Amino acid sequence: MSEEGYVEERTVPGALLAVVVVALLAGLGSLVWCYGLQGRLGVAQQKLAAADQKNADLAQKLEATNARLRATSETLGQSVGITQKQMEARTQSLIAAQAAQRAEAAKLAEAQEAANKQIGAVSTDVASVRTDVGGVKTDVATTKSDLEATKTQLNRVMGDAGVMSGLIATNSKELDILKHKGDRNYYEFTLQKGAKPVLLSTVKLQLKKADEKHSKYTMNVSADDRNIEKKDKGLDEPVQFYTGKDPMLYEVVVNVIEKNKVSGYLSTPKNAPKPSVTQ
């Protein structure tokens, strides 16, 4: 065999060996790659499991959040409902208050109108009263003038006992003036002929005779257990006598003489005893 042939025989197995080595290296590489790939797959699976766990946790948190949101929504709804009811109640209360205020304002207006009417009526009454007062003042002035004129007509005359009398009243009007002056006590009387004696102050008077034609009369005066006859006395004449422990001057004045009847008054000092019995 030639040297050239020998070289060809040795070259073929070498190539095969190279192929086998390459194949082994490739298979080893594949094994390494598969092993690496398996490791990466394990890591990926772990990451995927962790991601799933996170997703589960997020899902739970999301559910809890949704539950809280639903609860909050319900609470807000209830609060809004309550607030709306409160607002409606407040609105109704305001409407009622406004109605009450309007009613009160109407009452006040009516009261004011009534008060104005009353004020008008009072003003009218005041005007009438002023007019009446003016009339009363005029009447009072007239009365004062009449009183002054009447006072000038009152006279002092000499009595039947020779003593100057006080002022003499000739009628009831003048007697009222004397009573208001208050200088003496005055007791009015009317005596009937034949009647029992009439007690005035501390004396008794009894009519014995009345002469209407001649304006004369006769009466008995009983004082201090004494009986004094005052005979044929005239109209408006002061009939005088003394009586009492400390003698005081009493006066009888007759202003009216009629048939069997006379009327007049008894005048006594202010400090004279008051009557205890009236007949």
Image (spheres, rainbow, N blue to C red):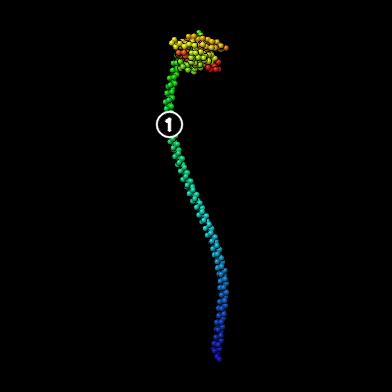
Q: Please say if 225 is above or below 139.
A: above
Which residue position holds label 1?
A: 121
Q: Please say if 110 is above or below 56.
A: above
Measuring from the top left, give residue 217's x and y in whole percent: 47, 11
The secondary structure type at the circle numbered 1 is helix
Would you call the spot at circle 1 few (<14 residues within 10 Å), some (14-19), or many (20 or more)?
few
In percent of the image, x 52 and y 10: which residue is there? 228
In percent of the image, x 43 and y 29: which residue is there? 125
Q: Looking at numbered disc 1 in the image, what kind of residue is underneath it?
A: Ala
Residue 181 visible in the shown view: no
Residue 75 visible in the shown view: yes
In percent of the image, x 55 and y 10: which residue is there? 226
In percent of the image, x 53 and y 15: which residue is there? 199
Q: Closest to the observer: 149 or 189?
A: 189
Locate the N terminus by quadrant: bottom right
Measuring from the top left, give residue 7's x and y in whole percent: 55, 87
Q: Closest to the observer: 229 or 24?
A: 229
- The residue sitting at the top extreme is 162
Q: Closest to the observer: 260 or 175?
A: 260
Measuring from the top left, give residue 48's x and y in whole percent: 55, 68
Measuring from the top left, give residue 247's x and y in whole percent: 55, 11
- The residue sitting at the front extreme is 194
Quadrant of the rendered image containing residue 146: top left
**How many badges with numbers are in the image?**
1
